[in-house]
Image (tube, rainbow, N blue to C red):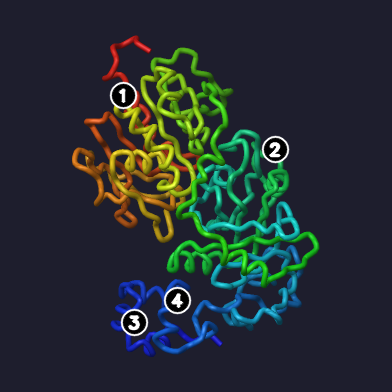
Amino acid sequence: MPLDVNDIVQRLGGPEAAARLTHVSAEALRKWKQSGVIPSKHWRTIIAATGLSLGDMPGGAVVSAPPVTSAKLGTSAAKDSPTMPDSAASSTPLTDVRDVAVPDGATAVLVLADGSLWWGRGFGANTPEGGAHVGEVCFNTGMTGYQETMTDPSFAGQIVTFTFPHIGNVGANLEDDEATTPAALGLVTAQDITVPSNWRAARSFIDWLKAANLPGIGGVDTRALTIRIRDGGAPSGVLSFPADGHFDIAALRVQAQAWPGLEGMDLAESVSCTQTYEWDEMVWRWGEPPARQQAPRRHVVAVDYGAKRNILRCLASAGCRVTVVPATATAEDILRHRPDGVFLSNGPGDPAATAAYAVPAIQAVLAARVPVFGICLGHQLLARALGAQTFKLDRGHRGANQPVKDLITGRVEITSQNHGFAVDERTLPEGVTVTHVSLFDGSNEGISAPGSRAFSVQYHPEASPGPSDSHHLFHRFVAMMDDRLPEGDS
């Protein structure tokens, strides 16, 4: 039976000794006590120091709901859901899965690498036998834009937990996809997917998920799951929604624990285009059909590490002819188009891995004195090309309500973000300045290298979904190209 966090802290010699032994802060200890969970990465140290077993670790138990007879599948009341995890429910130690019972009404399960089970009602596409979706489990705090989120290539390799409960209420349509193929592996929601009620809806979100072959799980205590991610970092997990209702829990746990994580993983090439193409569609205007850029003033080559469509629209609306090239394009591939500027797009995975082929190309572009603008992964790759390092954040920034301070103007902008890695600004070389910082955790959100005619931001100025506070950055990029070339050149 798992012990209480306070009991374990006392066995370690008290709060100060526990913090010193596990190399965490007093604030982290407070969060352990608040959530009732100790992150699994500390278990080995605690077990060695106390002689406790794996089953004694808080959070080291199956999260399952007791049988419910009053609730029927499809009931919307969360408190009566047979699939809501219940901390007071009976549990099974991690080392024993023989007696794990499927809660009444549950048709799907999310299995984390720490062994915990989060039961719920499956929706969307069933997972094939032996083919449950495995990846990093993260959370997104956005209140709108679930379709854009699921199709954002930056979510490749991830299962998205939505903290906002009302998912599906505007249905799905043909216009809001940010890429041709959804990149996320699946989603987790607190409530059942709602019936669409919006004039733009072409189909229900459930039908959209089925067509995209994406599974989902509803009826999960997303507040508890989010706290676990917040305090312990984004874990590996497996989402299983089998058509036959059979769950091989032992195998699913092995899958979750065996997944290597996003560190060291290059995913940009897998979501990038495979051949060069032109883009001219501009940002939509209310009540008007999509417009095309027919009189561009500057020519931009966009390197597609997983580019969102609305970024390309913003470049076109800023007066650019846009040529999109694959992530693996060399400097020669890029520069043969004779661009006025080069854009480095967003994308998934570890920038240190993608840097193997991206950084040499970016460095050659910088050496050619072509203006460069990067967003998200493009920001991280630019920083690495300039000589800085990147690192993985414990939980990442994902949502449409992230405050960022512009250190040049003093303005605070509310931004849309989706990243799990960040630039280590302590490693930035001379001549590269920090321009933006997160007001959540102080991490780097932007850099500028005037001598190299380059700048970048960690967040998404194109939003979609999210606020439009930062659209001006696209015009700043155009102004940089205007300064390089005489008016009228292209």
Give the quadrant of residue 164: bottom right
Q: Which residue is mark 3?
A: 18
Q: Which residue is mark 2?
A: 202
- Residue 276's spot in the image, x, y percent? 53, 25
- Residue at the spot 48% in from the left edge and 48% down from the top edge: 349
Mark 4 to mark 2 CA distance (whole Å): 45 Å
Q: In the rendered view, would you say 98 is above or below 245?
A: below
Of mark 4 and mark 1, the one earlier in the sequence is 4
Marks 1 and 3 in Cβ contact (< 8 Å):
no
Of mark 2 and mark 3, the one earlier in the sequence is 3
Between marks 2 and 3 in the image, the one whose residue lies nearer the viewer: 3
Of mark 2 and mark 1, the one earlier in the sequence is 2
Label 4 SS: loop
Mark yes or no: residue 303 visible.
yes
Of mark 1 and mark 3, the one earlier in the sequence is 3
Q: Amino acid at mark 3?
A: Ala
Label 1 SS: loop
Q: In the rendered view, would you say 9 is above or below 438?
A: below
Of mark 3 and mark 4, the one earlier in the sequence is 3
Residue 368 numbered tag: 1
Marks 4 and 1 in Cβ contact (< 8 Å):
no
- Residue 441's spot in the image, x, y percent? 32, 57
- Residue at the spot 40% in from the left edge and 22% down from the top edge: 335
Marks 4 and 2 in Cβ contact (< 8 Å):
no
Of mark 4 and mark 2, the one earlier in the sequence is 4
How busy is the neighbourhood of tag 2: few (under 14 within 10 Å), some, or many (20 plus)? some
Q: Which residue is mark 4?
A: 38
Mark 1 to mark 3 CA distance (whole Å): 54 Å
